[in-house]
Image: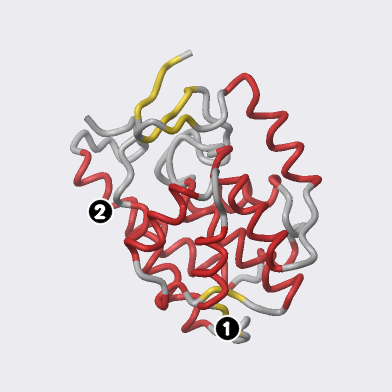
Amino acid sequence: MALENKLRLTNSADLAREEERISKKKAVELFENGVLDSLPVGKFSTLQAIHKFLFEDIYDFAGKLRTVNMAKGNFRFAPVMYLQAALENIDKMPQSTFDEIVEKYVEMNIAHPFREGNGRSTRIWLDQILKNEIGKVVDWSRIDKEDYLLAMERSPMKDVEIKVLLKGALTDEINSREVYRKGIDQSYYYEGYTTFKTEEI
């Protein structure tokens, strides 16, 4: 069954295709219209704005905190009752060095604030922080999918692997449309693996 959506699609594969097409188009608009440059760096409010922009044509919950508890495998994301507090703590985390930025990224992935579309939104959010704080962005096309997924799964316990992967893919082409477009193309490639258990509350 597909998530409830504005497109009135009931087949999950059809929804996934349309979600990819629409969110990629919106992500390009986000880059080209300069909206990202006007948003505060490293704040949840910015991630929320990114998510809303990418998914508002698809889901009513675009930009809204999830109201279900979620888990992947044996790992449970932040419980809904603690989610707001977790996001407030993430807002306060330092972000002046590469290590600090990745640690903040890992914590936001653990928080997993939205019902769907966390990966795509959070990677754009991460690149905005890197660009503003250290003058770099990630060239996502240089990161192997399986290595990334394993590193992200382990990152709540050990973030060394994800730091090594991301550091090796940094580029100073921070305003390159090509690098950004490659990141968008990769983003769905990274997101499609997830199967979550959800609990209505």
Residue placed most toward the observer, 154 or 65: 154
Q: Is residue 81 above or below residue 185?
A: above
Q: Which residue is mark 1?
A: 171
> Residue at (40%, 76%) from the top-left corner?
141
Mark 1 Cα-neighbour bin, 10 Å: few <14, some 14–19, many ≥20: some
Say whether disc 2 or disc 1 marks the residue closer to the N-terminus: 2
- Asked whether 83 or 62 is in front, the reply is 83
Q: Callout 1: helix, strand or loop?
A: strand
- The amino acid marked with disc number 1 is Thr
Q: Residue at x 55, y 54 (%)?
A: 122
Q: Residue type at mark 2: give it.
A: Arg
Residue at image point 49% right, 81% down: 179
Residue 161: where, in percent of width, then height?
50, 61
For disc 2, the neighbor class at 10 Å (few under 14, some 14 to 19, many from 20) is few
Q: CA distance from mark 2 to mark 1?
A: 30 Å
Q: Which mark is residue 17?
A: 2
Residue most toward the top? 201
Across and down, in percent, residue 88 comes to: 76, 36
Foreground tag (2 vs 1): 1
Q: Quadrant of residue 79?
A: top right
Q: Within the image, what quadrant is residue 1 found in?
A: top left
Above or below 171: residue 128: above
